[in-house]
Image (cartoon, helix red, strand yellow):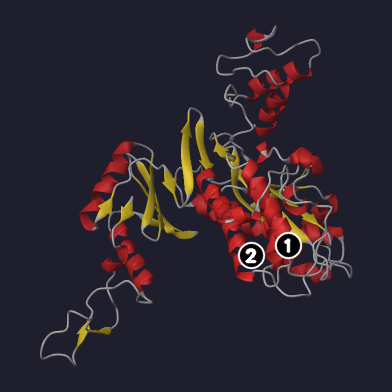
Amino acid sequence: MDVKTAFLNGDLDEEVYMDQPEGFVLPGNEKKVYKLVKSLYGLKQAPKQWHEKFDTVILANGFKHNGADKCVYSKFTSEYGVIVCLYVDDMLIFGTNMLGVCETKKYLASVFKMKDLNEADTILGIKVKRHSEGYALCQNHYIEKVLLKYKHLNVKEVNTPFDSNYKLVENTGRAIAQLEFASAIGSMMYAMHCTRPDIAFAVNRLSRYTSNPSAEHWKAIARVLGYLKKTKDLGLYYSGYPAVLEGYSDANWVTSVGDNKSTSGWIFTLGGGAISWASKKQSCISHSTMESEFIALASAGKEAEWLRNMLYDIELWPQPMSAISIYCDSQATMSKAYSKIYNGKSRHISLRHEYVRQLVEDGVISIVYVKSSGNLADPFTKGLSRDMTGFEDLGSLEFLPNPVYWTTNPVDWMTCIWLIQSPGLVVQSTGCRAWEFLPDSVAWTTNSGDWITAVRGS
């Protein structure tokens, strides 16, 4: 739903005066001014006053704030549960049934002038697609607009967004189209934050040269756009399973040319898809691989704590909450996280050490070892190689074929694994010799690699 002229609803706390607008000057009162009784567009306090007004209205209807995000409201009764997410004057309303959604819409429409956009189709440049087994988020229309804006770059389709073998360096000469470069970074960054975690590493690297871009940096921009051109229809898919929040953390030691800083990467998944991710240059110089991994783990721990707090205030989430598993491919980092020993080699990271250890002791997170090949955060520190561009592990929509269905029974998945590993069993479009081992809820695909993907995703 959309609130019409939202900022005009705000109540002013201060006395604000304005000149009489041209064409509306009262004869004989030319030297007088207007005193505002309501907020107007253009006032610096207009956004704040609108949010306070919306707060007052929706809290009066029995909703409560989410402790982790003041723009998320929830209401749970014996009949229904409703969650409202507000972004300025646009809102998404979720409900356990239509009764709660309709009552919320009716109440808001009685207070504000609202535009009902019905079932969510596009919100903030993100398309919401409903499928038989879940939902998908995609930005192909947004990417097409970005490509049209930069069509003068003559981008060609490529398989990867970034060439890891090519080392970008700072430009010592004159900047080339600096404002346009910053605009291109911002356009790609929005897609990266919303639905395209596969370009996070590339955008992270290129954003470091925004102040003084060179021709080589523009070539790298064109490569990312070329990758988006080829993969514009990719999106994130959420099946609802597994309903477990998990995280992955990784680091790449000393990747920044010039300042010798490392790169952190982390990602969290829920309901079969990625919900939060980041690829960032570390703010300090790490002295070892273990230290860089630990810095990345501390950053992932902060995000895990925030996600946990957000889910905690949603009554649909089971209580008490179990610890969030964060997978890490560094055994030295894990040993350090669970150790209480400080010594001369690592006492300079004592604050991060104490924070991570406190999260573990409080049951907020648990750290689990995973091989590098199974670490979903790896592409956020090294970029995508040619054989990694199918980012189905991050919750992709397009790489899993339509005939694949999910099951929550681990025995069913064990059957699938047995069929994949057993010699002589050829998977066919009509089934296979061991079809009787599988329940009706599982359908076959002709590519056994797709089954492996599905099993990994389970």
Question: Would you say residue 99 is visible in this rendering?
Answer: yes
Few, some or many residues within 10 Å of mark 1 (<14, 14–19, 20+):
many
Q: Which mark is residue 217?
A: 1
Left or right: 331, with 366 as reference point: right
At 86% across and 66% down in the image, what residue appears?
287
Task: State which quadrant residue 122 falls in.
Answer: top left
First of labels 2, 1 by sequence position: 2
List x then y, in percent, for residue 277: 63, 52
Q: Which residue extends farthest right?
A: 344
Q: Are marks 2 and 1 in contact (CB under 8 Å)?
A: yes
Q: Quick one: SS at disc 2? A: helix
At 63% across and 14% down in the image, what residue appears?
438
Q: Is 195 or 240 nearer to us in this picture?
A: 195
Give the amino acid at mark 1: His
Give the amino acid at mark 2: Phe
Q: Which mark is residue 272?
A: none
List x then y, in percent, for residue 351: 73, 69
Q: Is residue 160 above or below residue 252?
A: above
Q: Distance between the residues labelled 2 and 1?
A: 9 Å
Left or right: 13, with 234 as reference point: left
At 29% across and 62% down in the image, what residue appears?
5
List x then y, in percent, for residue 181: 63, 65
Q: Quick one: SS at disc 1? A: helix
Q: In this view, does 69 lie above or below 28?
A: above
**Disc 2 marks which residue?**
181
State the count of labels.
2
At 72% across and 48% down in the image, what residue appears?
377
List x then y, in percent, for residue 260: 83, 68
Q: Is 332 or 257 nearer to us in this picture?
A: 257
